Image (spheres, rainbow, N blue to C red):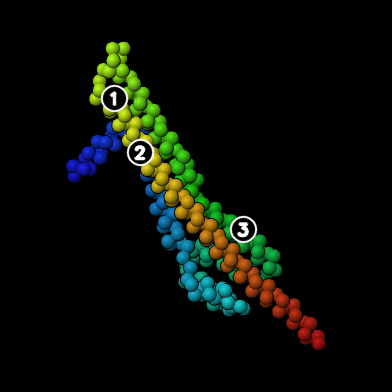
Amino acid sequence: MQDIYEALEAIKAGGAVVYPLFLLGIIAIAIILDKIYVYYRFLEINPSLMLLIESYGFDWEALNIGIKELGPNNYYTRFIQVILENKSHPSWWVESRANDESQLIEKALSRYLWVLETIVTAAPLLGLLGTITGMMHSFQLFGGSGLVDPTGVTGGVAQALIATGIGLFIAIIALFAFNYFSKQQAHVLDELERIGTRLLDNIRLAEEKSDSMPRSHLK
């Protein structure tokens, strides 16, 4: 309990800049938790379903059953469902609709990432502002006859260091989170591209079979 009290007192010594820094920290944590929930809840795909998609000439009904198990809100379900709904159309039409859906998914995944990127830059700058104000407070304690209040000087230096430390800490957390979720987003988009390619391959295969049937019938 004493350690918590001392930590709070040390944070208070950081000055007014600490409050917007804590606001940035709360925003960063909220975004991180939201992204964790989205990736855990809506971006899971069964390995068996991926094996089905990778197989040659798979059964479309089996694919339909597989995505129903993922749930309607799953991003992979949304993407595959678009292809299933349009698979009777020419492959170029299906590819266009699949690209549109992947762009919508990319937009959803990148939501609020710009805020994390902004926090990475803004938090150290706010910490630097706290450093400047703290040092200015220390310099004001020097009078024409010398040092007026030595305790006040150390307090100003402490304010500068605490504000800088908090700003850097928040920026580091936001930076790691931004890089991690950016990498996860790239991975999901690569998976969607791979799934779309495999499904389009099977659609083109069906088209080739249907085109060859009249010719073989004429023979």
Q: Is residue 33 visible?
A: yes
The percent position of residue 104, horizontal first and vertical second, equals 57, 56
Reply above or below: 47 against 157.
below
Give the residue at x 32% y 23%: 138
What is the three-letter code of the residue carrying label 1?
Answer: Val
Disc 2, SS? helix
The percent position of residue 59, horizontal first and vertical second, equals 58, 78
Foreground mark, 3 or 1? 1
Question: Circle 2 is placed at which residue position?
Answer: 165
Q: Residue furthest left?
A: 2
Reply above or below: 147 against 196.
above
Give the residue at x 18% y 44%: 1
Q: Residue furthest bottom?
A: 219
Q: CA distance from mark 3 to mark 1?
A: 60 Å
What is the three-letter code of the residue carrying label 2?
Answer: Gly
Numbered badge on residue 153: 1
Q: Are marks 3 and 1 in contact (CB under 8 Å)?
A: no
Q: Residue furthest right?
A: 219
Of pointers 3 and 1, the one earlier in the residue sequence: 3
Of pointers 1 and 2, the one earlier in the residue sequence: 1
What is the three-letter code of the residue carrying label 3?
Answer: Asp
Q: CA distance from mark 1 to mark 2?
A: 18 Å
Give the residue at x 31% y 27%: 156
